[in-house]
Amino acid sequence: MSAQSGAPENRFRPLDSGDRSVVVLDSATHAHRHATTTDAAPRTEVIVNASYAGVYCARLLEEAQPAAIIGLDCGIGKDGAGISGLWFFEALRIPAAAVRIEDVEHGNGADMWECGIISRVNGYAEAVGVRPGMGIQDAAAILLEAGVGTAIDPTNREVVATFGDHAVVCTNSIADALPEDRDTNVLCTAGHTGRSVIDYIIGSRPWGFICSDGAMGKNESGLAALEPAAAAGIPGAAVSAATARMGDGHSTYFDGIVTACNRLAAAAGVRVGQTAMEAARLLAIRKDEQ
């Protein structure tokens, strides 16, 4: 229990680094009391709280001006409500994560701190190195060291694999392609593959690309860029929006399952039902196979 008068019951600080610290709370509803104590330190605290990581709890926690947040996933739940606060914080450029409810007790911050395993992360948490399957204490330490105001590329660009002269690069949108990608890199991006991205694909001319199918849409419009790309000599594919998060190029690469590809990608061995990781590899090495 915190010794300070007025502090939330059972609040404790298990980890610190310089002027930053991890604060553990039993509930997001304790955020107001914490924020009004004299030892609260806005924008420097990683707040671990044993409440669901939804929007309502995110609004409560926002008052404390956290540097980062970890909550409970509560089984994800209907419409993803148990973790919807992760994207509330992502919009605020705050790293946030959730732990598996199967491993921890509701409303028990101490148990969460001892037993929590990360199940979900937002883009900012992922960008600084927090991953599903990681223990909560390791995740909190990473978030603590990331600090406040850490520069995070909103495109989430990362080289995830290299095959000879060609790299596989995750980035959140095909619109974020760089000159260095031209005729060199396979881009795994996370927008739809509709007509509005045709100019981006042809203009940037990657060695290959994998985007989202955007759940296809009317007249399969979410795939409209595939054949114009082939006509321009660029192999490409799309993954199911049900398997990979739109707006997250890493999810396209690590989670995505191919639902469509153009004829040049098919010639390289890309097939419907394949993982995006395998499809990206095949696109990267296609020069050696064709």
Image (cartoon, rainbow, N blue to C red):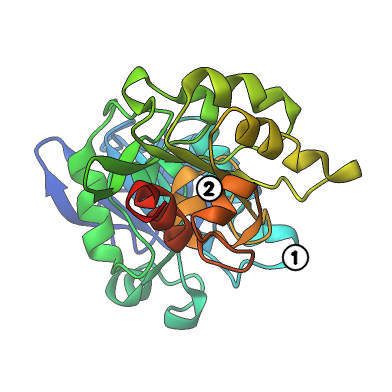
Asked if residue 247 lies left or right of residue 122, the reply is right
Amino acid type at mark 2: Leu
**Residue lying at the far bottom of the rendered structure:** 102
Q: Residues within 10 Å of mark 2 (few under 14, many from 20)?
A: many
Residue 45 placement (x, y as % from top left): 29, 41
Q: Quadrant of residue 271?
A: bottom right
**Residue lying at the far front of the rendered structure:** 290
Q: Earlier in the sequence, mark 2 or mark 1?
A: 1
Q: Which mark is residue 86?
A: 2
**Residue lying at the far left of the rendered structure:** 18
Residue 261 placement (x, y as % from top left): 64, 51
Amino acid type at mark 1: Lys
**Residue at the (38%, 29%) spot, across then down:** 183
Say which element carries label 2: helix
Asked if residue 269 lies left or right of residue 227, the reply is left
Which residue corresponds to mark 1? Answer: 78
Q: Which quadrant: the N terminus?
A: bottom left
**Residue at the (73%, 33%) spot, across then down:** 194
- 238 or 214: nearer the viewer: 238
Residue 39 placement (x, y as % from top left): 25, 38
Relative to 266, say whether 65 is above or below.
above
In whole angstroms, how far apart are the C-alphas of marks 2 and 1?
Answer: 15 Å
Q: Quadrant of residue 148?
A: top left
- 71 or 38: nearer the viewer: 71
Asked if residue 189 lies left or right of residue 21, the reply is right
Relative to 172, say whether 143 is above or below.
below
Relative to 262, say whether 116 is above or below.
below
Q: Residues within 10 Å of mark 1 (few under 14, many from 20)?
A: few
Relative to 231, say whether 2 is above or below.
below
Residue 160 placement (x, y as % from top left): 30, 49
